[in-house]
Amino acid sequence: MIKLNSLKMAALKNGVRPHLLCQGGFTLIEISITLALLTVLMVMLSFGASYFLKEGKRKESVTEIRFIQQKVRSYAALNSLNIGDAIAKSDLVGTGKLFETEPIDPATNASYTWGSTVPDVGTPYVSSTDTSVDPTPVD
């Protein structure tokens, strides 16, 4: 304590403020390492976020295909159609029909590929151009 007081007294004589003698801080290396770690964490976060966004779009596409499949089954039941009977996209899409507008694949923002007949159970009526989407519906 005595040594610190003598340093303060010497500093005061030389015109240096004593609170600057005891001031701590970070070195340039410590700040650089901290910034590097934060950068690595941000890169990892951005890759994770892009994966979750892509996976969300894929799941949304599968849900949309399932919804279309259920509508096709309903249309077939209401119109007494059997498996293999002809059914066109124009029968399903349009004003006053099951779909007012044509559904768009959320994974690719493109149109689905539509079938031409009432599908068998477990066979999709529409398919996506996105190869990561498993179009096999659960009826």
Image (cartoon, helix red, strand yellow):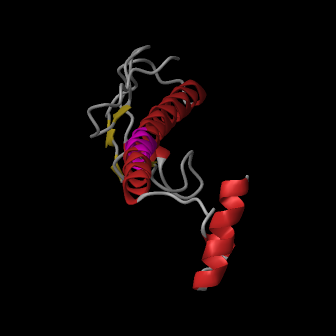
Residue 12 appears at what percent x and percent y? 66, 80
Q: Front-most of 113 and 74?
A: 113
Residue 37 appears at what percent x and percent y? 41, 45
Within the image, what quadrant is residue 96 found in?
bottom right
Establish if 63 lies above or below 95. above
Please give left or right for residue 106 compared with residue 67 in the image.
left
Please give left or right for residue 46 compared with residue 20 in the image.
left
Residue positioned 48% across, 24% down in the render: 81
Residue 92 appears at what percent x and percent y? 48, 44
Report if residue 50 lies within the magenta region: yes
Within the image, what quadrant is residue 95 found in?
bottom right
Establish if 66 lies above or below 20. above
Report if residue 84 lies within the magenta region: no
How many marks are shown on the rendered structure?
0
Residue 75 appears at what percent x and percent y? 54, 33
Q: Front-most of 25 and 111?
A: 25
Question: Which stretch did the figure color magenta?
Answer: 41-51
Residue positioned 67% across, 65% down in the render: 6
Q: Majority secondary structure of the magenta segment?
A: helix
Establish if 128 lies above or below 46. above
Within the image, what quadrant is residue 122 found in?
top left
Q: In this orientation, does residue 137 appear? A: yes
Q: In this orientation, does residue 105 appear? A: no
Residue positioned 39% across, 35% down in the render: 87
Residue positioned 55% across, 55% down in the render: 100
Q: Front-most of 31 and 75?
A: 31
